[in-house]
Amino acid sequence: MGDALLEWPLAEHNGLCRYTENTITNVDELVVHCLRAVKEGVALDDEDAELDVGCIGVLLTDERNRPIARLSISAPLQRRQASWAALLKTAWDQLADCMGYVH
């Protein structure tokens, strides 16, 4: 996550485009949102990019805790379930095992 924080000046320079009224367009707010997601191990999209669509995502990291990919589920917001976060984390654990990552 530390390397990703180096990219914030780019976001500040280019701006953060608003797609819906829920889109985070303030860099400081985005940093808080991202740090919370890292701490909790899961990120939520609550109509940030598209109305009535919500996503749950997990960051996939290697054995050195460097981000290598993400895994997410998108669905109509009213059907999204918090329990999907645990399913994503389990799927990541299985993928990590298959790829030989120590996690």
Image (spheres, rainbow, N blue to C red):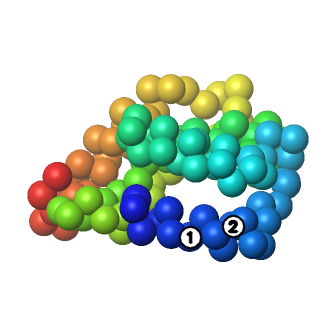
Q: Could you tell me which secondary element the residue under label 2 belongs to?
A: helix
Residue 90 in picture, x, y percent from top left:
29, 41
Number of dots carrying numbers? 2
- Quick one: label 2, few (<14), some, or many (20+) residues within 10 Å? some
Q: CA distance from mark 1 to mark 2?
A: 7 Å
Q: Are marks 1 and 2 in contact (CB under 8 Å)?
A: yes
Q: Determine if residue 73 is in view.
A: no
Q: Quadrant of residue 8?
A: bottom right
Residue 87's x, y, as percent?
Answer: 37, 37
Q: Is residue 91 left or right of residue 71?
A: left
Name the residue carrying label 2.
11
- Residue 100's disc number: none
Q: Which residue type does callout 1 highlight? A: Glu
Q: Give 61 or 9, whichever is nearer the viewer.
A: 9
* Residue 61 sits above or below residue 21 on the image: below
Q: Which residue does the numbered mark 1 point to in the structure image?
A: 7
Kind of residue at disc 2 = Ala
Q: Residue at x 79, y 65 (%)?
A: 15
Identify whether 10 is placed above or below 42: below
Q: Is residue 36 left or right of residue 20?
A: left
Residues 52 and 6: in front is 6
Q: Is residue 90 visible?
A: yes
Crowding around mark 1 (Cα neighbors within 10 Å: few <14, some 14 to 19, many 20+) is few
* Residue lying at 85% horizontally and 54% vertically, measured from the top left: 18
Which image quadrant: the N terminus? Answer: bottom left
